[in-house]
Amino acid sequence: NAGVTQTPKFQVLKTGQSMTLQCAQDMNHEYMSWYRQDPGMGLRLIHYSVGAGITDQGEVPNGYNVSRSTTEDFPLRLLSAAPSQTSVYFCASSRQGAAEQFFGPGTRLTVL
Amino acid sequence: AQSVTQLDSQVPVFEEAPVELRCNYSSSVSVYLFWYVQYPNQGLQLLLKYLSGSTLVKGINGFEAEFNKSQTSFHLRKPSVHISDTAEYFCAVSDSGGYQKVTFGTGTKLQVIP
């Protein structure tokens, strides 16, 4: 099992550009989440999904879109990148009813 | 709403010395509590979790934590640290029902000094 995979590992964008961060899991987990990690702020929830076709906003959703068409995939879209979105992004998945989250290796995004 | 406080942003400790990383939480409902570890340039990995039952929880790599409901704390301890324990440690809390939104603390960087 690959677990949770994320692509790309690194990305540099210019202000105003759009892009999609990919996340996939092969554990058949129902729940998937996107977090951003900024120095001194821990991890903050951007969006989450409790199953295919069902998504909801987290703590810091502005500027990001998500969709969940399959159980395995949960892409995060930046609509118009801003320097404030420079961060490390983590995708996580968990089984319904279980509390433990499994994290991907992260995507380091820089917006110039 | 729930919150997590990790008062120490950095904790230096000599190799083979004991360490305690502090975590306090607030929540109006029953909670699950976690400690995750993040090694440099990696994702987070579960160290241990408290869901119910015994308040002393043992995790991987010799770590343990004690849930104290009256003090709303979940401090992480290890009796003897190794160089390989150098990492950032995150305390987290979630509701105990439905989709468990997880709230993370700001992290504590453990620096083990040879």
Image: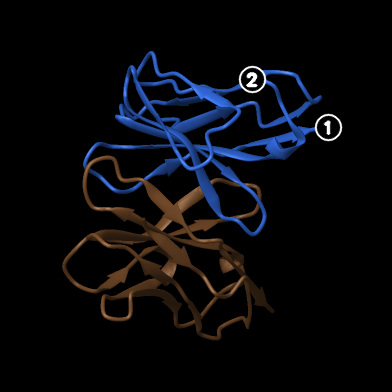
- Chain for mark 2? A
Which chain does the blue colour mark?
A: A
**Residue at point 64%, 59% (across, down):** A40
- Chain for mark 1? A
Across and down, in percent, residue B16 comes to 56, 83
Mark 1 residue element: loop
Across and down, in percent, residue B76 comes to 42, 74
Report which residue position mark 2 lands on: A79
Q: Residue furthest bottom?
A: B17
Quadrant for the C terminus of chain A, please: top right
* Inter-mark Cα distance, 2 to 1: 15 Å
Label 2: how many residues lie within 10 Å, few (<14), some (14-19) or many (20+)?
some
Residue B77: mark: none
**Residue at point 64%, 75% (across, down):** B112
- In the drawing, does residue A5 fall left or right of residue A68? right
Of callouts 2 and 1, the N-terminal one: 2
Q: Residue furthest left?
A: B53
Compared to residue A49, the image places residue A59 above or below, namely: below
Q: Colour of chain B?
A: brown
Report the amino acid beneath label 1: Leu
**Residue at point 65%, 49% (across, down):** A38
Across and down, in percent, residue A53 comes to 33, 17
Compared to residue B95, the image places residue B87 above or below, namely: below
Report which residue position mark 1 lands on: A112
**In the depicted view, which residue is nearer to us: A23 or A48?**
A48
